[in-house]
Each structure stands twice: as structure tokens, then as C-alpha cells.
Image: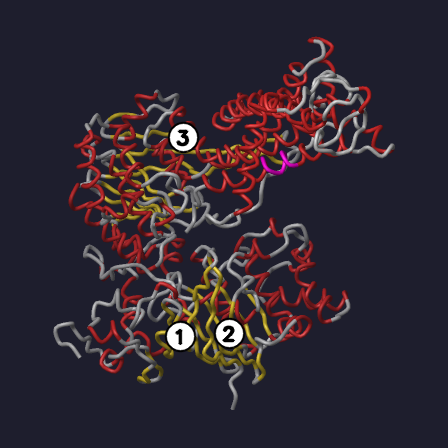
Amino acid sequence: MSDQACLLSVKDLRKDFEIRTGLALKHELFTAVDGISFEIAPGGSLALVGESGSGKSTTAQMIIGLIKPTAGEIVFDGKLWSKGHVSRRERRLRARQVQIVFQDPYLSLDRRQTVRSCLSECLSLHFDLDAEERERRIQELLDQVGLDERHARSRPHALSGGQRQRVAIARALAAEPRLLILDEAVAALDVSIQAQVLNVLADIREATGIAFLFISHDLAVVQQVCDEVAVMQDGKIVEFGDAESVLRHPENPYAQRLVDSIPRRGWKPKRGFVTSA
Amino acid sequence: MTDLLEIDGLAVELPVDGLMRSVLHDATFSVDAGEAVALVGESGSGKSMTLRALLGLLPRGAVVHGDIRFDGASVLELKGAQMRRFLAEDIGTIFQDPRAHINPMRSVGDFLCEGLVSTRGVKRKVAVGRAVEALRAVRVADAERRMRQRPYELSGGLLQRVMIAAALIGDPRLLLADEPTTALDVTTQEEVMAILDELRRERSLAMIFVTHDLELAIAVCDRIAVMYAGSIVEVRPSTEIHEKAAHPYTQALLSARPSLATRGRRMEAIQGRPLSAFEVPDGCSFAPRCPYAVDLCRQEAPGMHSVGGGCARCHFAERFATGTWVTEAEGV
Amino acid sequence: MSAAQVAFGRGRPALLGRISANDWVAVGAGVICALLFVMAVIGPLVAPHDPLAIDPLNVYASSSSAHIFGTDESGRDIFSRILAGARPSLAGPACVVLISTVFGTILALVSGWFGGWPDSIISRGMDILFAFPGLILAITAAAVFGPGLVAPVVALSIAYTPVLARLLRSAVQHERNLPYIAALRAQGASGWRITMRHIFPNVAPMLMVQATVAYGYAMVDLAAISYIGLGVQPPTADWGLMAANGQPAIIAGHPEQSIYASLMVLITVVAVNVVGERLAQRFEVQGLP
């Protein structure tokens, strides 16, 4: 795939954290992300799967710009993102390219803001709309995520976890990004609600052609919405391929273990792994 | 023969904002000696509340109706020293987040020995010996060294195994596990559940396993009790659930998990959100969300209907169990 | 005793639930605060006697219809002095709280939002200020600016700023680490907007509680400063001064001056604390259902 044809291209991305050990005079380097590379096509859907400590969330935070990479390149739509200081204007531009939905439905929204106010604020950050246009756009966003006027008037505490996540999705969509990062976005939701939100995401993808980067520890969820899967372990990608192959016939032993551990019909938990975990 | 544990019409009300609100309606089920029963449900189902009532850990001001009988004797009336002895001798508990339930300032050894020394009057040296044994039973390598370590030095999975060791150390007859693996990675979950399963069978321990993961429950338990909005809506042997689920909610839970089979298509998601017991309208608690609900469902709350090897709280349980799902058009 | 050195504590524990309209404690406290405010404004004007008028023939008089609270060691009417004393007694702490809150908030927001160097510099600066007991600063200020209310007020404001800054800084840091702030940053919102429109309103309830607690401490501190002669000067009426002046008379069997003056301080501190806490509850928006 040529650079021009892909939406997001990540090359040898690396993030080291300094950990203070002992009496804070020594610094140790902890490598959270150890030189990973992948691509997402426009409208594509990639899952980054791994357990805690695999580096998947750190990767997401680098792509959304909350953390600066130690090394490596992020190329969006053919343009290389600078690793140094990012101007306010540049940050606004990036906001219109990539957006993110976080895991915690309770803390992802400002508890003092109504839903309408939250969406309105984000719209005003990116677009110059008059009151009528803004209201129309807010209605559109609410429709896309399956919320109505009642929800628009509410503050987060009056909404359920699933509803709050929908608001978070609507907020992300307000910027009209081309890539949406979902950082364990359904992990904190009830099972029956997860299914609803996954449907909302599928509908949005079909309607807008937006691409997804799905960060998850839950392989079952990932297989529903993603075309491609990258399995991460200790900061590296250990397996990469289209969803069906990776989930049916993983080649890497760790990926195999991950797939085997999912509770499903006929499954029984088996021992046999290293006992230090 | 009396079951080991009988829960009979248990109902709990909690004071919320000055009003008494129901969080558990009429829970009735029993656990045989050596049997593992799962309480499966989403938020508001009342599954955790049931465990708390058994442990006497309800918030202040809670009102409890019904009865819980252990070995024939009522547990709800136990107070003080009697309650503590019951908890120490007969019950072992495993909580969801080990870091929240183990004192971070004290060593693993202290944690394991504490119950034995303080409540059972076991001598410290003997207790230490039993603690090391317990750690070995949960396959913790290098047990003596681990005894001296503090919780922060152990990973989540290891700490949860320490919690299991602590639950088993007093030789209980009933294990209560409240979402024991929810906070763990999936590979660690498998390891921990395998150990728990093995130990439970070795010692013929009864268990109540609270979880939101239906497939996990089916894999490790003998019977499943599905809970919704504060009531038990279905009880069924785990071998039967996939084929013969008799309640629409159970079926919905089974279909809610994505699989390769549903890839690329929309999932069958039921509308609405899980309710708490006090939000339930008249009639069947599941009716607002049930794709098959008819007028009867909204007017009259169904009782438990015996179907196959279990029972289900649905007017049409018999029809659902045979696998012929009724559409609204067909009616009663 | 400089209460400024003592940390104010984390504030009130978990909120006690929504306040109903029947919360007579809050209503009562509100009424008292309103009355105190009125007293401060028109006190001297409605006093039955001149607060400064001496009557050597009538010292230590007991309560009577002419003198509701009796008279002090110089024959002055205690009730009138209480009314007149409201102004300096209430305004002084108000100035301290206002100044220290404004500066403390600014420092906390800058420190909490930016972290890194600005945080280190500000925190160390606050630590240094923290080391000076309010009383020492007040004495120094009195030496520089002369006796009166201005010097102690300025000194206490300086002493209280680090306490408020520190408390607020941790609240700001906590807020700043929440996912919704990250979401706003991902939206490209500026630090200014996030801080003013989101962080500040969310820490404001805590600020309200701390400010009212500080008011109580400031009141007591200023009274102590007046007591040792550095603040309000006699014969000006001031509750702290009156409490001090009345001390020798207590043993002699005439505790009226000290008692009534101390009572006014007590009532004020309690009423202000209750109002502050209730206001904070009213404006606090719960995050979880």
C-alpha cells in the first residue's frame, strides 16, 4: 500500500518511560512501546489487542497526541506529524483528523455540563456556525448515536453508562475526524449494552466512512467490528493479519494463548502456563 | 436431605436519598454440598447484593426480608461473635479486586495467618505452616519467600491466588466468589479459574460464583441462576443452558457476545438498559426490553415455571425451552 | 497561636445527601450571616449608646434596660460596642480570605495545570511561605506598617495563601488527570479554556468550603493579634479586643464583655462554616448516579 493510499501509517513507533528507582537518583528506562509499525486504510478498522502492559493504550495516546513518542514516525494522510512542540493551530488541525473515546463512561464527560453544552462547545472549537446551524448539527450527532432531546438536556449523572459512551462518541464525531480511536470503549459497559454500542459504531462507520483503531483486551468484541487485528505483547506486535485468520488460526504462541483463553461454548479453563503471572 | 445453603425469598431494601428502595426481590435458590452455582447478571441484577446479605455486609439501614439458612440454621439472625465464627469457619470469600481487600502495609504471610490466629486461636507457628501449604495449593512458586513480601510486589493474578489461598485456609464448606477474575487479564483469568476449579473439586467445596460473564459461569459451575433487575429469572444446569434456555433474557445474554459468526453483521442487541429492582414496572420485569413481550407480560408478573432441568420466570417458558421462539404476531 | 500553620484538612467528608428545603440548620445559619452583614453595615448607626462614651460612674454594670449587656471597665455600653465592633471584626477576616483565595487559586491553577517547572517553583515558594507562622509575619508587618488592621490583614493573607494554594493544587491535579480533560485536549481546546471553563468550576465547591473555614481561622487569628496589641487599637470596638480586655474582669465576677464578644466570634464562625458547606453541596455536581 503506497503512503498516499493509507490514512494512518505508523513506523517504528517507540515510547520509553523513565522510572525512578531506589532513592530517586537512578532512572531506569521502561520501554512501553518497542518499535511498532502498522497502517490503517481510509475507512479501515484495525484492532490493537493485548493484555495489560502490552503498550496498546500508550500507542493510542501517542496517536491522539497526548503523549510524545520517543522515536518513530506517525504519518497521517501523507503528512508526517512533528514530534516536537505542536502549535495550537496544529493541534486543532489534528483534532479534526483523529479523535478518541475513552474507557470510563463516568469520567469521560464533564459532570457539570449538559450533553447539549458539551457538544456545542466542541462544535465551536472547530466550526464557525450560527446558532441554528449548531443546533441542527447537534441533532444530527445525537441521531447518529441514538440519543434524543431528553438526553441532550441531561447532565451525565442522569445518564446510564451506555448513554454516556454514546455522548462520548458523539463528541468525538463532532470534530468530523477521519479516524476514531476507541480505547477499551465498551469494556466498562454491561454485556447487553456493549452489543448496542457496537451496533452504533458499525452504523457510523457505514454512514460516514470513518476508520477505527480499536484498542481492546477483549478478543470477542474485536472480532465484531474489525477487519484487521494486531496482537501486542510487551510493546511489540507479535501477530498481524485480517481478523478471521488471526482469530481462527493464530500463528504466534502468545496470540494462540490469547484466543484459547476466551470463555466460549465447550471451553474449560486449563492450567499449564508459567505460574509467576 | 437439607441443602447446604438455602436462600428463601430473600429481599433487600436500601435507603437511597431518604427513601427505601428495593434492590433485591424474592431470591430463592439452594446450593448443595460440593455444588457450584453461578449468579449471573448485569448491573442492578442484585447478584452482589445477595452475597452481601449472606456475609452480613449490607450498608447501614438496609432492611432484609426472607431467610438464608446454612445447614438448616438461619444465618440472618447471627450477630457478633456467632456471625464471625460462621464467617471464619464455614465461609471463604474471594473478592473482585485483591488490592482493595488486602492490607497493603502488611505482608502476605500476615494476611494469610490473620484469620486463623485471631478467630480460630491457632498458634502462630502452626498458622504459618498452613499458610505456606495454602500458597502451594494455589500453585504459587517459592511460597516461603512470597510469605514475606508485600502485596505491591505481587502481580494481580498472583495476588488473587493469595486471596483464594486465604479463602481456603480455614477449610470452609462454602466458597463465595464475587467477580474474582473480572479485574484480571484473560490469560491470567484462565489460570486462576483453572486453579480454583481444581481445588474446589478436590475438596468438594460448594461455591456461589457471581459474575457477569455467562460463558465463564457455564464453564466452571454446575448450575446457573440468571438474575435480572433484582430477581432470579432462570435457574438451569449449565449443561442445558446453551440448548434449552427458557427465558428471553438468558437467550439475549447468550447472543450478546460477539463471535466470528456474527462478524460483519449487526448484532442482535435488545433495546433499553438493565434496570435495578426499584425501577421495575408492573408485570414482568423484563417486559420493557423483551422482543416477545405481549400484553399479558406487561400486566401480570410471571412466577417461576418448571421447565426441563430447571425453571424460568416467564409466562411462555415452556414454549421458549423447546426452541420455538414465539413472535409477537403469534401471541399467547 | 497561628492557625494558619495548621493545615485546614481535606474539607468536609463525603457530602451528606441532597439538601431539602427544610434544612433549618442551613436556613438558620443563612439568616445569622445576613444579620451579621447588616450589623456590620449599620451597626454603629443603630447603637443605643456611643460605643466610645466613657462613664466612670457606671463601670461593670450588670444587664439592665439601659445597658442590655451591661458595661465594661470604662463604663462603655457593651451592646453598643458589640454592634460597632461588627465592622472591623467581620471585615478583617473577609479581606484576608478574599486576598488569599484569589492568589491561592491563581497559583493552584497554574501549578496544577502546567506541572513541571512552574509547579516546582510555585510549590517551593509556597513551602517557604508556609514556614512562617502567621503571627510572626503579622508582627513584622506591624513593625513595618505600624499598628492597625491593615498590617495584620496583609500578613495573614500572605500566610494563608500557601495553605489554600496547596489544597486547591491537589484538587486541580486530580481534576486535570480525569479522562474528560484528556478528551478536551484531544479536541484541541486551549489550556486557558479548559482551566477556566472546566477545572475551576469543578474545584469551586471545594474552594467555597475552604474559604469559609479560612474565614473562621482568620477571625480567631485577627482577634489574637488585636489581643496582643498589634491590630485594632483601643478604644476602637473590636470583638477580639473586647474578649481580651474583659479577661481580668472575669475573675472579678464581670465576665460580660468577654463572654458576649467571644460568643459573637463563635456564632459567626459556625454560621459561616455551615453556609459555606451548604453552598458547596448546592453547587457540587455529583459525578456518579
Residue lying at 73% horizontally and 66% vertically, measured from the top left: B118
Magenta span dominant secondary structure: helix
Q: Residues within 10 Å of mark 1 (few under 14, many from 20)?
A: many
The amino acid type, in three-letter code, at marker 2 is Met
Q: What x and y, as percent, mark residue B236?
A: 36, 78
Q: Residues within 10 Å of mark 3 (few under 14, many from 20)?
A: many
The image shows residue B121, relative to residue C41, as above or below, that is below
Label 1 belongs to which residue? B224
Label 2 belongs to which residue? B207
**Residue C124 can be seen in this image:** no
Name the chain letter of the residue that bears numbered label 1.
B
Residue A256 placement: quadrant: bottom left
Per the model, the C-alpha gap separating discs 1 and 2 is 12 Å
Task: Answer left or right for A153 relative to B47.
Answer: left
The amino acid type, in three-letter code, at marker 3 is Pro
**In terms of depth relative to the viewer, which is nearer, A142 or A152?**
A152
Work out which quarter of the rendered image holds the N terminus of chain C and state it: top right
The amino acid type, in three-letter code, at marker 1 is Ile
Per the model, the C-alpha gap separating discs 3 and 2 is 48 Å
Residue lying at 69% horizontally and 54% vertically, measured from the top left: B148
Q: Tag count in the figure?
A: 3
Q: What x and y, as percent, mark residue B28?
A: 44, 78
Residue A101 placement: quadrant: top left
Label 3 belongs to which residue? A69
Nearest to viewer (mark 3 / mark 2)? 2
Farthest-out residue, left: B329
Q: Residues within 10 Å of mark 2 (few under 14, many from 20)?
A: many
